[in-house]
Amino acid sequence: MRRGFRYLVLGLGGIGSAAVYWLARQAGEDVLGLEQFRLGHVRGGSQDHSRIIRLSYHNPAYVALAKRAYDAWAEVESEAGEQLVIKTGGLDLSPEGACIPLADYTGSLSAENVPYQLLDAEEIMYRWPQWHLPEDVQGLFQAESGLVAAARSNAAHQRLAREYGATLRDNAAVSAVYPSGNEITVVAGGETYTCEKLVIAAGAWTNHLLAHFDYHLNLTVTKEQVTYYAAPNPVEFAPERFPIWIWLDEPCYYGFPTFGEAGPKIAQDVGGQETTAEERDFEVDEAAFGRTDAFLRRHLPSAYGPVIYTKTCLYTMPPDRDFVLATLPEHPNVSIAVGAAHAFKFASLLGKVLSELANTGASSYDISPFRFDRPVLFEERPERVFII
């Protein structure tokens, strides 16, 4: 087995799989991707049927980046020969007095010349009678929103990377990393590898790897969950009949049409308890489940039915909940991405950015808001703002 590579990617979830693909397009067999568990494992944050994709965001920088994310996914779809993005339209729902201002979203979309519609509760319930809403709710509808087929996208990135000649190895946990000038040695899965450029896309295990470079970021890890319901008439929630949606308040809920299972999916954003990658369990958080269950029965009663299952995942968030996307200050041959628990919609694009950083140390996209050296990442007691 080959032991020396130009590029080595640690972590093959959503972002890492994308990085391996974009690097392999340029460097083929000179790319190695390592995953500590089996490929497609459910211990991280990116393995499920679906993730939201949208242009609607609280900050114009994210809207601009989201536009480019759609382009990246289109390239992958064309090459993979399969549909990965399903556009359903997206509905942002804002009750009166919501702590997430709808004006942040409309302002960001307007700044980036993205069309949208503002709807009152009556119009929302006319278009989608599945909703039961109080009259003070306003809605923002953006037609390009939808979902990314998450597990299918990870598999597509990995398959295409292999077709370009990349080597992917799973069950290869990292035990040591030795940076030395222009070469980095990685010991993983009982084997020793060397590379010129290292890419870290490790989610909740990020600080484990950064410790080898004497860095530690302020990252909060939480155990979150999603629940699928066997709606009495799941066709009412088919992707062509029902949009993805987000309830812009605290608690913040979000949901999907029927996709991958025989009914829709609902979750609370940042509704889980803090944990670590090692200590997390896979048990249902009954308090969090009670909140989403009550919301569904109140506002989407026709979606309510027997629970198909509840599935857990991990969020890994910097204090400001912005991405980390950069090279390490004292190790320019090491690139890193932290997706801040809202990155899957950007996953292919972030993989492309990581490939640029690995090649030149810079990106053709504006990633300045996501620099590694911003103070909040290293403050002793940073203010944590997870609402976006």
Image: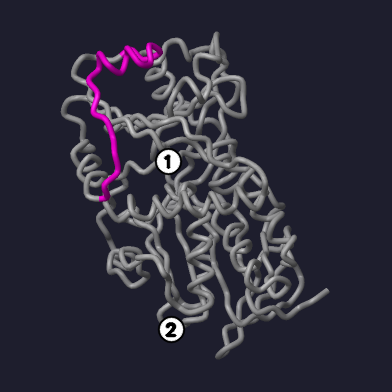
- Give the crowd class for mark 1: few <14, some 14-19, many >=20 residues within 10 Å: few
What amino acid is found at the position of numbered circle 1 in the picture? Gln
> Residue at position x 72%, y 65% from top?
164
Name the residue at 45% across, 55% down: 339
Residue 378: x, y in percent?
33, 68
Residue 330 - label: 2
Q: Secondary structure at mark 2?
A: loop
- Determine contact: label 1, label 2, CB under 8 Å: no
In magenta segment, residue 125: yes
Q: CA distance from mark 1 to mark 2?
A: 34 Å
Q: Estimate the x, y position of residue 57 in percent, counting from the top left.
A: 31, 44
Residue 367's place in the image compared with 108, above or below, is below
- Location of residue 335 with respect to 249 vertically, above or below: below
| Residue closest to the eye, 330 or 117 | 117
Q: Nearer the viewer, mark 1 or mark 2?
A: 2
Ranked by sequence position, the earlier of labels 1 and 2 is 1
Identify the magenta region: 112-132
Give the label on residue 351, or none: none
**Residue extending farthest right:** 1
Specify few, some or many for label 2: CA neighbours under 10 Å numbering under 14, 14-19, or 20 or more: few
Does residue 362 show up magenta in the picture?
no
Query: To which residue does mark 1 refer?
Result: 273
Is 78 or 26 nearer to us in this picture?
78
Relative to 301, is 20 on the left or the right? right
